[in-house]
Image (spheres, grey):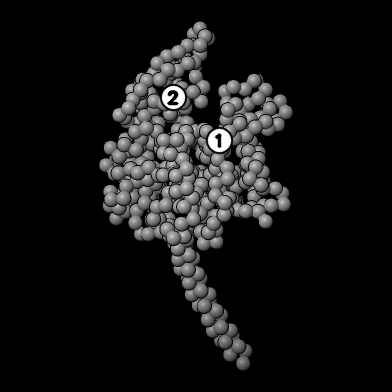
Amino acid sequence: MARDLAIDLGTANTLVYMKGKGIVLNEPSVIALNRQTGEVLATGREAWQMIGRTPGYIVAVRPLRGGAITDFEITERMIRLLLQRVGVSRFTRPKVVICVPSAITEVERRAVTDAARRAGAADANLIEQPMAAAIGADLPIDEPVGNMVIDIGGGTSETAVISLGGIVALEAVRVGSFDIDAAIQNHIRREHGIAIGERTAEEIKIAIGSAAETVDEATAEVRGRDLMSGLPKTVVLTPEEIRDAIEDPVSSIVASVVRCLAKAPPELSQDFLVRGMYLVGGGGLLRGLAARIERETEVPVRMSNVPLEAVVLGAGHVIEHYDALKGMFMGVRR
Amino acid sequence: MPLLIIVVAIIALAILLIIRRTKRSDDAVSDFRRQINALSSDARKNVTDRVRQISDEVPADEQGEPNGP
């Protein structure tokens, strides 16, 4: 008998929770393929290490962008391989709950459930990421009080107000930490004439990226290819210039939080001032982001204990109480 | 006689409809209660214990990078 699964199919990472066991897989959402034969050469961590370092006939791709499936066939193959790795076969077909961005279209919704069913799931249901994050972050969403969750992922940022087990207000933008990486890449190309890969851009963001001024700021040295000469070149980057470079995506995220606050009913708004907002998702780890949101909204922001796992743990709770919580699936609610 | 049968049938149908309607609203109430109960902190204890276990295992400053391992 197959154990039911909860999957956080993120733009950046895919996490799998197995009923009764906990998190059994946490890998980057990357697949490496042989361009000529179409064969899968690696998935997850192994494929992630190949990004930008493959010979011409190998391509390492992220099949999800902005929280949406950009390549249905590759996503299906990736899900199939991930499910195989956690023990799903054609004889053991589990029920699967998949976390998806709340703003996905009907077509995208169908693409995800079809991909999971074809990959071996007996039944596939979807749940909104902010709802799953609120459950996983242990917020009292069963009570008639306002709980606000900000989930910043690789491709999407979502803010939701949850009370009595349901979403009261929601705001989502297709901007996430990959857009911050892309902004860094563009800045270095434009201002320093150097081409860098997406992994280097990510490393710069982790090393010196920030959304607001922080106490311990340091510079970083970056090596890339000079666009004029084609030779390797080193430049020194300051936190201020990276802050300026990522201002656009960061301000889009902050603006969406403000819009969600404005949509919330006044009774619940009072609760946020006391209880604060909860920040989850890998993008929430950007230095100074919590402080920046706090400054612009005047509402306290708290970081979840497990920002990267909150969503899958929430979906895991749903799979543990499948019958009681099946009314929460997308498309089921009236 | 046929009139009596029709009247009885209509009354029986009405009673059936009322019972079904009441049952459905009771179902909705109990479904909502079950959902809220399943979201309570007691029900979530197993998952929250796992959350704590993860946060104890991984120090806050080493919780991985946003986009990769």
Tag 1: amino acid = Pro
Left or right of A159: which side holds B6? right
Among the 4 quarters of the image, the one containing residue A28: top right
Q: Please, what secondary structure does the residue beneath circle 1 have?
A: strand
Q: Nearer the viewer, residue A108 or A63?
A: A63
> Against B31, is A184 above or below?
above
* Residue A326 or residue A138, whichever sits in front: A138
Relative placement, left or right, of B6 versus A297 is right
Crowd class of label 2 (few under 14; some 14 to 19; many from 20; radius 10 Å): many
Q: Residue at x 43, y 28 (%)?
A: A206
Q: What residue is shown with label 2?
A: A204
Q: Kindly identify which chain the residue marked by label 2 belongs to.
A: A
Q: Position of residue A324 (x, y in %)?
A: 51, 62
Pick the residue in front: A183 or B39.
Answer: B39
Report the residue that reaches farthest toward the front.
B57
The quarter of the image holding the N terminus of chain A is: bottom right
What is the chain identity of the residue bearing mark 1? A
Q: Secondary structure at mark 2?
A: helix
Q: Can you say whether A295 is above or below B22 in the image?
A: above
Q: Residue A301 in the image: x percent, y percent?
A: 33, 43
